Structure formats: C-alpha cells, structure tokens
Amino acid sequence: MITNQLAQFYAVNADNYDQVYAQEERFDDLDDLQEMVAELFQGHKVLELACGTAYWTDLIAEVAESVHATDLLPEMIALAETRGLDEDVVTFGVMDAFNLPDGLEGKYTAVFAAGLWAHVKREDQEKYLKTLRTKLGKDVLLVLLDETYVDGNSMVFARTDLEGNTFQILTADDGQRYEVMKNYLTDSTLRKRFATSARQVRIERMEYYYLLSCRLK
C-alpha cells in the first residue's frame, strides 16, 4: 500500500514533471501566463511552494529581488538546481507546503505556487489560507497557478468523495498506478473560498489554466 500517493507519484515521475508545459496546444496560455507572472512579482521577495523542477522559478528570478524555491521532494530540488539559476537571487530548500515552519513572517513579500491548490482538499482550503496568513503575515501577495479541466485533454475522474474532491488514476514511469486527488475549481468556488482570508482577489481564466492573485488579510 502506498501511503502518500501524490508524493510517490511525483518522486517517480520527477524527470517528466515539465512535460505538461511542452504540449503545443498550451503554448498560447503559457505565453500569457509568463507575462502576467513576471508583472506580478516585479521587485518582490518570493517564497515559492512546490516549485517542482523550477520551471516558474526561472521566470520569476528574472524580475524578483529574491526567490526561495521549495519543494517537499529532494528529487525535485535536485533537478531544479541543475537549471543553473543565479545564486545571488535564487535559493532552494526542502519544505512541506502543508506543514510550513515558523519564522517565515516578515521574510517574504509574496508567495507563489503552481499546481499546488488543486491538491488542497476542498474542506481544508479556508483553513490553509488562514495558515498562510499566520505563517507569512498580513498583506503578503499570494499567487496561485493551476489547471482548468478540459474535456479530451485532462485525465478523467476515477471517483468523487463526499466533500466533492475529485480523484484521478495516474500511471507513473515505474508502471505503478497512483490515485491522486486533483480538484478543478470554478471562479465562483475560488472566490467563495478566498472571501474571508484575502482581498483584491483577481482571477484570470484561460483555456488550460487559471491564475489567481490576492493579498492575505
């Protein structure tokens, strides 16, 4: 029995983590996202959660004052470090986005996560936002990038639980099948979840992705 299927899947598939960004049909969305992300993080001190192989870190490092890119998996950090990013701007570290350490408040002006919010249980989302506020402080810029469900492109759902969380069955490079929770959220659901914990909530919805930015209250 695999105890943490999400972590196990990404650890096994670390080398192929960026394949989703190589899909030609997504290029227009990615071009727009890169422009928006660069504008949002201009001059910021950024904490990146679940950085993966540093696909977005590379872009953010061009405009931010500093980026501390973190991931739960050492396999991802090892790959991220091979990008050769400017060490005066970018640092890397292992960190669990769902168990943030103390001592972060005041160190960062912004936090970024790509692909993370889909893995936060619907019933835990408001609590997680409050945790971010407690750990990072008031008025920190929060930017979340995640996928939109697209018929014929996105993996079909294997099941939905009583809270509305949706699960997919993914096959990794080792041939093992993993059940992974991944939620595709509507704008109305996002706004409802963020209403009590954030202000200036803005959502840019594209065909394959959405980008949410806000300030933690």
Image (cartoon, grey):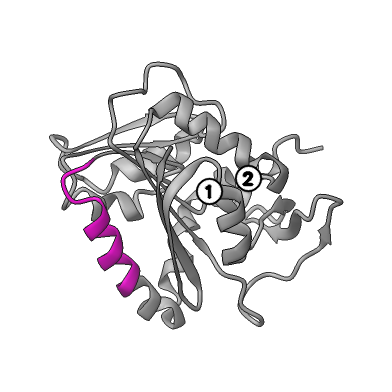
Q: Does residue 185 appear in this view?
A: no
Residue that carries the numbered disc 2 in the rendered image: 120
Is 27 positioned to the left or the right of 169 in the image?
left
Residue at point 70% right, 52% down? 180
Residue at x-position 82% and y-position 58%: 160
Disc 1 designates what residue? 116
| Magenta residues, start to end | 31-44
Q: CA distance from mark 2 to mark 1?
A: 7 Å
Q: Quadrant where the C terminus lies?
A: top left
Q: Nearer the viewer, residue 166 or 174?
A: 166
Quarter where residue 138 is shown: top left
Question: Residue 105 colored magenta?
Answer: no
Q: Can you give x and y, in whole percent of width and height, for residue 206 in the image?
A: 46, 75
The amino acid beneath tag 2 is Val
Residues under numbered marks 2 and 1 in contact, where contact means CB atoms less than 8 Å apart: yes
Helix, strand or loop at label 1? It is loop
Predominant SS of the magenta segment? helix
Residue 152, image x, y percentages:
65, 82
Secondary element at image label 2 = loop
